[in-house]
Image: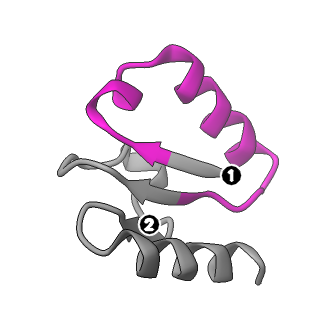
Amino acid sequence: MVYVLSPQALYSESVEAAWKFFKSKGKKIVIAQLAPVDPPDAIRRSARFDMTTDYRSAFRQMIQALSQ
């Protein structure tokens, strides 16, 4: 699952339900950071990719992490 981290995502009940479901099933969650906000504590240790500066490089790294 790719969690798109933004201020709006932090307050979305449907986004929260989705990442909690994936986490409960032991599925991999990676964070695509679109804004300078902290992720929820429960997924804070997930791999995080900063899309705010070098989008192309971060996207490539994220795809690589998902395929492992």
Residue depicted at x 77% and y 78%: 67
Residue 1 got which mark?
Answer: 1
The amino acid type, in three-letter code, at marker 1 is Met
State which quadrant residue 27 falls in.
bottom right
- In this rendering, would 32 be left or right of 61? left
Q: Which mark is residue 45?
A: 2
**Which is closer to the viewer, label 2 or label 1?**
1
Quarter of the image for residue 50 reads: bottom left
Measured as percent of width and height from the top left, residue 4 is found at 47, 45
Q: Is residue 18 magenta?
A: yes
| Residue type at numbered disc 2 | Arg
Residue extending furthest toward the front: 56
- Distance from disc 2 to disc 1, alpha carbons, whole Å, reads 14 Å
Q: Quadrant of residue 60?
A: bottom right
Seen in the image, is 56 located left or right of residue 10? right
Across and down, in percent, residue 40 comes to 38, 43
Magenta residues, start to end: 4-30
